Image (cartoon, rainbow, N blue to C red):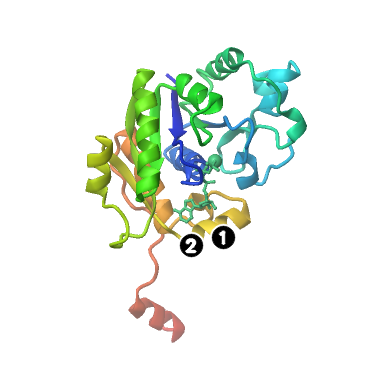
């Protein structure tokens, strides 16, 4: 059965799109079929992160030009399927959300997971992204303004009787300037199910137009996303990544002794 999960937060720039892409990629490494949908019809950027800025058919064309949803479904080289929204301002029109929801639901049976990248704010895009989903994953950084916006998102989800599966804390430095995991759980009355460290590899991966889980599989953020995928699947995550050489092995190699 296909699970529809929205990655949500009313706060902008906290890592929703990054999470949608990297959770999606991590789930594919566990053998799952995943479709990531860009539900940001006014400020889309999923395809920019993945190096597919111009595609023949977008979600907007499906809505406004009678194209089929499968025409806007692209296989990314990472094994992930994506449905991008249009980058063109000309394609922003009045959105028939009931039809959009039906179209998204028609993806049922085509993947194990449909991950919906939601927009910031509490608006028609974000509320409809929530309505079409079975579960809500809330993204927040460990700072008060971000947590306070996460709380609004959780309240909205509860109003719509949606299951909030947990909070993903992103861009975590683990220093004394930020809120702790326990603080966030108390404030949101919701468990934190993943901690994604602030990671410089993220900037490189954006520049490489690749999910960090793929371009930098050993990076701390990548491990966080793989652990999150395992948690959602109810599996134990065993770190199977290539271990860096320890100093002894490094020296042996340098000396040509290994
Ligand atoms: N763990 C991380 N470490 C470092 N940088 C990160 C991390 N997570 C996200 N970023 C960076 O933060 C910025 C915002 O991320 P992203 O676009 O995913 O946020 P968003 O919530 O989707 O934003 P919007 O609300 O505009 O849609 C990007 O530059 C991204 O590379
Ligand atoms: Mg985004």
Q: Position of residue 85 (x, y in %)?
A: 65, 32
**Residue beneath disc 2:** 200
Quick check: can you spot residue 67? no
Would residue 92 be found to the left or right of residue 158 on screen? right
Does label 2 point to a residue whose CB lies under 8 Å from ligand 1? yes
Q: Is residue 116 above or below residue 45?
A: above
**Residue drawn 62% across the image and 37% down it:** 43
Occupied quadrant, residue 206: bottom right
Q: Residues within 10 Å of mark 1 (few under 14, many from 20)?
A: some
Q: Secondary structure at mark 2?
A: loop
Quadrant in which the C terminus appears: bottom left
Does the CB distance between marks 1 and 2 fall below 8 Å? Answer: yes
Q: Residue furthest bottom?
A: 255
Residue toward you, 119 or 201: 119
**Residue beneath disc 1:** 204
Q: Position of residue 3 (x, y in %)?
A: 43, 23
Quadrant in which the N terminus appears: top left
Does label 1 point to a residue whose CB lies under 8 Å from ligand 1? no
């Amino acid at each position: 059965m296909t699970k529809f999960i929205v990655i949500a937060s009313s706060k902008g720039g906290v890592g929703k799109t990054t999470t949608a892409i990297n959770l999606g990629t991590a789930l594919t490494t566990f053998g799952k079929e995943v479709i990531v949908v860009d539900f940001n019809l006014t400020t889309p950027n999923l395809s920019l992160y993945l190096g597919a800025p111009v595609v023949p058919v977008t979600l907007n064309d499906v809505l406004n030009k009678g194209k089929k949803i499968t025409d806007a479904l692209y296989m990314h080289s990472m094994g992930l399927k994506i449905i991008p929204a249009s980058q063109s301002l000309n394609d922003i029109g009045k959105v028939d959300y009931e039809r959009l929801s039906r179209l998204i639901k028609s993806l049922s049976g085509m993947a194990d997971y449909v991950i919906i990248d939601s927009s910031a704010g509490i608006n028609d895009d974000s509320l409809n992204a929530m309505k079409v989903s079975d579960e809500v994953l809330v993204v927040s950084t460990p700072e008060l303004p971000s947590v306070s916006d996460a709380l609004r998102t959780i309240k909205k989800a509860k109003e719509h009787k949606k299951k909030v599966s947990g909070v993903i804390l992103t861009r975590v430095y683990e220093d004394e300037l930020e809120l702790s995991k326990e603080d966030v759980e108390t404030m949101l009355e919701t468990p934190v199910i993943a901690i994604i460290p602030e990671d410089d590899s993220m900037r490189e991966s954006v520049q490489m137009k690749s999910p960090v889980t793929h371009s930098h599989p050993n990076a701390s953020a990548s491990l966080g996303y793989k652990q999150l995928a395992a948690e959602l699947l109810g599996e134990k995550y065993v770190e199977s990544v290539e271990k860096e050489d320890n100093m002894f092995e490094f020296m042996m190699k340098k000396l040509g002794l290994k």
